[in-house]
Amino acid sequence: MSATITPMPSRNMADARALGRRRRLVDQLVRWACLAATAIGLFFLASILFTLIIRGVAALDLTVFTRTFEPTTYGDPDAPRGGLYHAIMGTLVQTTLGTLIGTPIGLFVGTYLAEYARGSALGNAVRFVSDVLLSAPSILVGLFVYQMVVLPMGGFSGIAGSAALAILVIPVVVRTTEDMLQLIPNTLREAVVGLGAPKWKMVTLVCWRSALSGIVTGILLAIARITGETAPLLLTSFGNNITSFNLNSAMASLPIAIYQQANSGFPDLIDIAWAGALIVTFGVLAINIIARLLLGNSK
Amino acid sequence: MSDSINSTMPPVVRRKVGSFGDRLFEAICRGAGIFVLLLLGAIILTLFIGGLPAFREFGIGFIWSTAWIPAEGREQYGALVPVLGTLITAVLAILFGVPVAFGIAFFLTELAPPWLRRPVGTAIELLAAVPSIIFGMWGLFVLVPVVQNYIQLPFGEALGALPLVGAIFASNNFAGTSIFAASLVLAIMIVPFIAATMRDVFLTVPPVYKESAYGLGATRWEVMKGVVLPYTRISVVGGIMLGLGRALGETMAVTFVIGNANRIATSIFDPSTTIASVVAMEFPESLMGSVKQSSLLALGFLLFVISFVVLAASRWLLRSRLK
């Protein structure tokens, strides 16, 4: 322990006052430092949102939503200006498919952990692995799906992108589903079983229904996460400059389109990238806020 | 569960209602759980098998070789530069990020007035939800010029002439994309994760412990230092490890701002690369089944091993506090 807390109070009043002043001063300094730390965190969030709004809104117009990729105009006002329709569609398709594939698996795993495997060795292993997957580098999921889907199919494809996103959905849904099911009081389960209902009906008709808003929150958070994922898609669906709904060929997505156009070096394409960044970020943040409100209302 | 109950019952008991549905449902749930286990196993296995040709070609020296020569005919690849880049950026990000994250967690649990805690906490959590590509773009177009003009140049001038350590700060890098910029972006990205974990951990301290310290006249900082931190220190380290694990595998944000130069950097203001960003940059255009592709998969395997160890340690440290 440092000098701020002396084990024996001083008998000398002047010493005691000096000590008290020093302790209060240290306390004040730490409080200002913590306030500064919080301000730093909020400042960066504000800076990102501010940059997005300034650069994004300037570039955002209807053509972004209705046209597909066009090469740079080189500042020629008559040349056709490109948009992100292809990327928005690609993201919608892959995010929807990824969510549809990943959610049921995550839901069943979460149910297994909460209803069947409390304290069992297999359950602990599954919980551990799911938590590791939750924070594991997403680009490795891309490499995995490349080896498992892209190589056998002989090329990048929308279905590979969806598979990679599905793998990222699973641990998010597992975590929230288990947490929400854990909150249900056991007396409710006992009441259902006491009426003679089989366990699967107890789980599906009572537990899932009581935890519904929490489970939906988890699914929304998962959607928010995969909507902005770039790295795994780079190795699986690769990106495309035309609108494609063919799951067997390379498919565009909003994050990839942003990545490619932001690095193109052409100011007009970078503007479109900012517009895309604005769309993605506010979409993701909106989903997050909705998820939080949903959870807040149920409590 | 139901199996063990059935086996202890006398065989003449009538069938339980819905027992087929029960067994089917449990099998589905258990199967999904086993699927997740197999998934992780399969990820490790495919990365290892994919990297095997590279390990065979270059031997174990692949790990500490600095070569990265894609020229056809005399191709040679080594992992040292990306591995070092990954570790250095992640550790620097932790150094920058942890004090800020601790400050936020302390502010949100003890210092802020109650009406302020929820909105500020939500805002910090929203920072965690911003996609990494946005951090990358913002980093490249906003942060990199600031870092170059106000940090790289003054520090390089002031500290570059120092003996021994001067080389760390001196740099002729004109692009501005550097290890330092990447660490800074990573720090901003992991602060919300560490802060949220620390906050949740601080909230698990029984109020009576804190109240007894306050009752003795301790200031808030003394309560934090003398009661809360000793009580939670293992979990705090776990939260930091969680941030480290995230920083190690972050791809797009780093790719934008690190400069992607596959050579050993002597200064923190020089460009370098990380495992994740070299894979993102070079894998999509590598030929199927080539030595290069195999080398990148081998790098992926190394990244998996590193981040798995860190994340497993984090889970283990956090096991008692957070479910």
Image: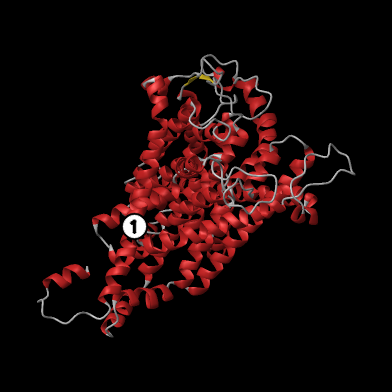
Question: Where does label 1 land, which residue?
Answer: B33
Residue B305, quarter of picture: top left
Nearer to us in this view, A215 or B176 = A215
| Residue at the limit of the structure toward the right, as seen here | A78
Seen at 37% across and 20% down, the residue is B59
**Residue B35: x, y in percent?**
35, 54
Count neighbours of disc 1 (C-alpha within 10 A) and say few if under 14, some if 14 to 19, many if 20 or more.
many
Residue B58, quarter of picture: top left
Seen at 40% across and 56% down, the residue is B217
What count of labels does the image hold?
A: 1
* Residue B213 visible within the image: yes
* Residue A12 visible within the image: no
Position above or below: B8 against A11: below
Position above or below: A241 against A217: above
Nearer to us in this view, B94 or A92 = A92
Q: Regarding mark 1 in the picture, which secondary structure is present there?
A: helix
Position above or below: A75 against B14: above
Nearer to us in this view, A204 or B233 = A204
Left/right placement of residue A259 relative to residue B278 reads right
Position above or below: B185 against A174: above
**Residue B11: x, y in percent?**
10, 76
Q: Amino acid under label 1?
A: Gly
- Label 1 resides on the chain identified as B
Left/right placement of residue A3 relative to residue B273 reads left
**Residue B92: x, y in percent?**
50, 33
**Residue A286: x, y in percent?**
62, 61
Seen at 78% across and 49% down, the residue is A59
Name the image colouring. secondary structure
Residue B137, quarter of picture: top right
